Image (tube, grey):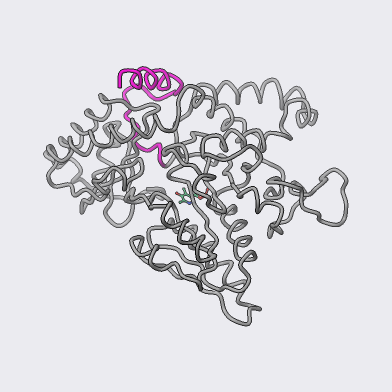
């Protein structure tokens, strides 16, 4: 325990957090590291401005999608060469869902759940609408409740696509059971790691999931709009005919061949020119993981989450816990139902305690041990108690919704 506290006292120093702010929103946008700032300044002052186009070779830009992909692979239990950074999560869901459906051409059903993040469902709807323009037997998206995903897996399902940790409530899927049953029945599996990569000790290879995607700007702290990543099980990579075909996924981009030939390996999941400045920030932010394991992060996250749940239960009986109480059933966030959750969160933000609001009445707090400790958690609970006791949330300025909640 003391060892862990020391490790996390060190990692906290890597972050540039505003004085006095308690940041409980790293599950939505990770804070900036000092390393990202230094790296970005170097990229601007010494690479882009001085080297210009030579930077693609001399500053390592061309190799960066794979270099950063390999770093992320190491953090999600994947081998080198099975993960690449690319695009954003929605686009990567397009790529892997299209690939998974082509690997199961006799089947027509995509299974997902109502706790999935809407963009994943939107992508499925778009792909299915396109396929149904020409399909003899129509494709369908079957959306069940999170609790019934396992039961709903059968031999009609082509692909089961779930997000491991529910973005709203923090509920954690039992992925071992889902993947095991899917494998037995010939169902392809897609795992969205947006709320678990960098928060849980994810082991995609041990789990034997076929595809995974995730984003760079949440628990990996890559900065707003940081590139996302995509994992493909190594035995499948070269069987995939990419649906988004572009030169950066070509076998030989600088041959300028008129015919598309996919690159061997995970590189075929890339499409166009990578966002280099975003990648450099993400690359530097990942240095913070050098002295800490995901198992340690998970252990600490559960300790801090439990502390927050216990403190809030005593101080704020009006708040109803939306997150499972059993630690094995939750990710790294704690959410509460409250009728005026939006105003509540705004009142907290005004005091420097940053959480966020999700429809219809959820106040959500991310627990990120890399830069949070017991003192932060207790102070946040004290503010929460005060805001509720004094009803300071109950004023018009906290009730007007911003575009981003
Ligand atoms: C945050 C998040 C996304 C974000 O997708 P982008 O395309 O990167 O905006 C997708 N899926 C889940 C589950 C998320 O939590």
Left or right of 72? Residue 17 is left
Residue 312 falls in which quadrant of the image?
top left
- Classify 396 as above or below 1: below
Q: Residue 164 in the image: state x and y as whole percent.
A: 42, 50
Residue 357 or 272: which is nearer the viewer?
A: 272
Image quarter of the N terminus: top left
Left or right of 103? Residue 339 is left
Q: Residue 16 in the image: state x and y as whole percent.
A: 44, 23
Residue 181 falls in which quadrant of the image?
bottom left
Which residue occupies the extreme front position in the image?
184
- Classify 244 as above or below 223: below
Q: Residue 274 in the image: state x and y as whole percent.
A: 68, 41
Q: Which residue is depicted at the point 60% across and 26% down?
A: 40
Residue 160 or 309: which is nearer the viewer?
A: 160
Q: Which residue is depicted at the point 53% across and 50% down?
A: 208
Residue 54 or 175: which is nearer the viewer?
A: 175
Q: Residue 289 in the image: state x and y as whole percent.
A: 49, 27
Was residue 7 drawn as part of the magenta stretch in this picture? Answer: yes
- Classify 46 as above or below 31: above
Q: Which residue is depicted at the point 38% across and 66% down?
A: 151
Residue 394 or 84: which is nearer the viewer?
A: 84
Left or right of 354? Residue 75 is right
Was residue 25 drawn as part of the magenta stretch in this picture? Answer: yes
- Classify 382 as above or below 339: above
Q: How many labels does the image show?
A: 0
Left or right of 385? Residue 211 is right
The range drawn in magenta is 1-27
Q: Which residue is depicted at the point 54% across and 42% down?
A: 225
């Amino acid at each position: 325990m003391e060892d862990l506290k020391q490790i996390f006292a060190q990692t906290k120093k890597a972050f540039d957090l505003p004085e006095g702010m308690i940041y409980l929103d790293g599950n939505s946008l990770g804070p900036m590291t000092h390393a990202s700032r230094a790296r970005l300044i170097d990229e601007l002052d010494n690479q882009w401005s001085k080297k210009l186009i030579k930077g693609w070779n001399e500053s390592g830009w061309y190799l960066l999608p794979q270099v950063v992909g390999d770093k992320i692979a190491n953090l999600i239990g994947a081998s080198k060469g099975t993960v690449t950074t690319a695009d954003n999560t929605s686009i990567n869901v397009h790529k892997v869902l299209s690939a998974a459906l082509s690997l199961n051409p006799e089947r027509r059903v995509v299974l997902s759940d109502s706790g999935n993040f809407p963009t994943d469902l939107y992508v499925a709807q778009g792909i299915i609408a396109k396929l149904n323009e020409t399909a003899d037997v129509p494709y369908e998206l079957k959306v069940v409740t999170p609790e019934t995903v396992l039961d709903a897996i059968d031999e009609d399902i082509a692909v089961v696509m779930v997000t491991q940790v529910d973005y709203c409530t923090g509920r954690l899927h039992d992925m071992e059971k889902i993947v095991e049953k899917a494998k037995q029945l010939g169902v392809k599996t897609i795992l969205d790691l947006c709320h678990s990569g960098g928060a849980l000790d994810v082991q995609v290879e041990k789990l034997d999931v076929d595809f995974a995607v995730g984003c760079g700007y949440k628990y990996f702290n890559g900065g707003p709009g940081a590139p996302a990543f995509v994992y493909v099980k190594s035995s499948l990579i070269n069987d995939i005919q990419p649906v988004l075909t572009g030169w950066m996924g070509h076998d030989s981009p600088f041959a300028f061949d008129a015919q598309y030939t996919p690159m061997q390996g995970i590189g075929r999941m890339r499409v166009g020119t990578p966002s280099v400045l975003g990648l450099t920030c993400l690359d530097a932010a990942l240095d913070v993981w050098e002295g800490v394991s995901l198992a340690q992060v998970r252990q600490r996250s559960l300790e801090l989450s439990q502390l927050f749940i216990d403190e809030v239960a005593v101080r704020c009986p009006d708040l109803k816990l939306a997150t499972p109480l059993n630690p094995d059933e939750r990710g790294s966030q704690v959410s509460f139902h409250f009728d005026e959750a939006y105003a509540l969160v705004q009142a907290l933000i005004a005091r420097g305690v940053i959480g966020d609001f999700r429809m219809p009445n959820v106040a959500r707090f991310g627990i990120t041990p890399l830069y949070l400790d017991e003192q932060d958690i207790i102070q946040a609970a004290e503010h929460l108690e005060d805001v509720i006791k004094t009803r300071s949330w109950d004023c018009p300025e906290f009730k007007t919704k911003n575009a981003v909640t």
